Image (spheres, rainbow, N blue to C red):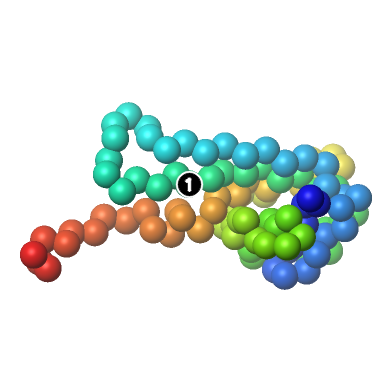
Amino acid sequence: MSLEVRFDGTLIDEQYYTGLTNNNELFNESFVLGTTPCNQYKLKIAKEGVNAQPSSITLSDGISTFANLEIDNIEEEDYEYVYTLTDKMINLNFYYDAQKYL
């Protein structure tokens, strides 16, 4: 299995990948029925591999996409960019009151 990183649909050559970590937390302080975890990633790409900063990043295993990611932050270091990313589950983080439908 190989990792593929795409910036706005364009494949980044794997020689520029310098790091990837994943953190996912299901519960903060209490259990809530229907809670779904939101994954957060830190992706590091060598500066030579980045032509323009992306608006979205996807990760796949070469067969299927396993992460469609929102960019939370971009840090520029000496030789690489560090992207703090959150999966699109963050878009579902809002209060919904179904009371009026009961």
Query: Label 1 belongs to which residue?
Result: 38
Which residue lies most toward the top here? 29
- Asked whether 44 or 14 is in front, the reply is 14
On screen, residue 8 above or below 20: below
Q: Is residue 102 left or right of residue 49?
A: left
Residue depicted at x 48% and y 46%: 38
Residue depicted at x 34% and y 45%: 35
Residue 48, quarter of the rendered image:
bottom right
Residue 8, quarter of the rendered image:
bottom right
Residue depicted at x 77% and y 60%: 62
Residue 97, quarter of the rendered image:
bottom left
Does the image show residue 94? yes
Q: Where is residue 17 in the image (x, y as percent from the top left)?
A: 83, 47
- Asked whether 76 or 68 is in front, the reply is 68
Q: In this view, does 79 lie to the left or right of 96?
A: right
> Which amino acid, mark 1?
Cys
- Asked whether 59 or 85 is in front, the reply is 59
Q: Position of residue 96 (x, y in %)?
A: 24, 59
Q: In this view, does 52 lie to the left or right of 38?
A: right
